[in-house]
Amino acid sequence: MGRARLLDRIHAVFDTFDTAPIPVIAAVHGVCFGGGFELALTADVIVADKTARFAFPELRLGLVPGFGGVPRLERDLGNALVRELLLSGRSLGAPRAHEVGLVAQLVAPGKALDVARKLAKQTQKFDAATVAAAKPFLKPFPARRLAEEKALFCRLLTSPAVMEALDAFVHSKDAMPYLPRARAPRTQASPAS
């Protein structure tokens, strides 16, 4: 399957979540980077526990997010935060994501899925036709910007530098080579005998 066709299929799945006639709720625990972050952005509501971190590390690989992350984040939060996340490559902790409105509910570690399930149950109390009619108004679908992002991603993906960076990423012995390395724990020197 060609790259463009694969990307079209990924977009079709993400767009289905984004435009679903029912509420879509994401529960996030821990690292939510790249495509995972883009998938979370298709949800109507994000519930994150306090350990969650959000980032677009793609620029470190010579790419831009390719699954609709930029248009969806712009739609949800505005362009200033999008520029900061993309151009710095830094991650956004769950408390800050909650503060800026990306995360609707901030919960204790390990509780995001439970809270998301309770919220999903609550949303089932409303008339499905009313919810389906309201969703496009509440959350406009950024079709033009999604197409522009997809075209840029495909163009960048053919770059030899990107292919080299992706190969290094895939073959890295580090679990997540784009994350900052953990500092070695300090050891106390024992007194000389």
Image: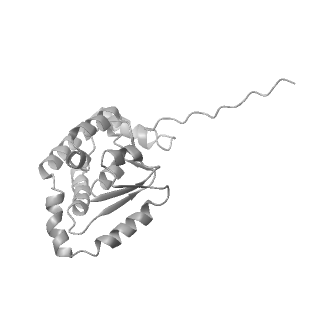
Left or right of residue 132: residue 53: right
> How many marks do you count on the picture?
0
| Position in image of residue 26 (x %, y %) | 35, 60
Work out which residue is located at the far top of the displayed protein and give it. Answer: 192
Where residue 154 sits, quadrant-wise, is top left
* One can see residue 158 in this view: no
The image quadrant where one finds the N terminus is bottom left
Q: Which picture quadrant has residue 61?
A: top left
Q: Residue furthest left?
A: 144
Q: Nearer the viewer, residue 90 or 162?
A: 90
Q: Position of residue 58 (x, y in %)?
A: 33, 40
Q: Nearer the viewer, residue 157 or 94?
A: 94
Residue drawn at (40%, 46%) of the image: 95
Quadrant for the C terminus, please: top right
The vertical placement of 14 against 162, above or below, is: below
Q: Position of residue 3 (x, y in %)?
A: 25, 50
Question: On the rendered structure, is 130 left or right of 59?
Answer: left
Q: Is residue 172 above or below residue 136?
A: above
Q: How is the image coloured?
A: one colour
User: Which residue does the image show at 41% across and 64% down from the upper left?
Assistant: 115
Residue at x 38%, y 36% (from the top left corner): 90
* Residue 131 visible in the shown view: yes
Quarter occupied by residue 9: bottom left
Asked if 43 appears above or below 164 in the picture, the reply is below
Furthest residue in direction right, as rendered: 193
Q: Position of residue 88 (x, y in %)?
A: 34, 32
| 160 up-or-down from 134: above or below | above
Which residue is more in the foreground, 94 or 148?
Answer: 94
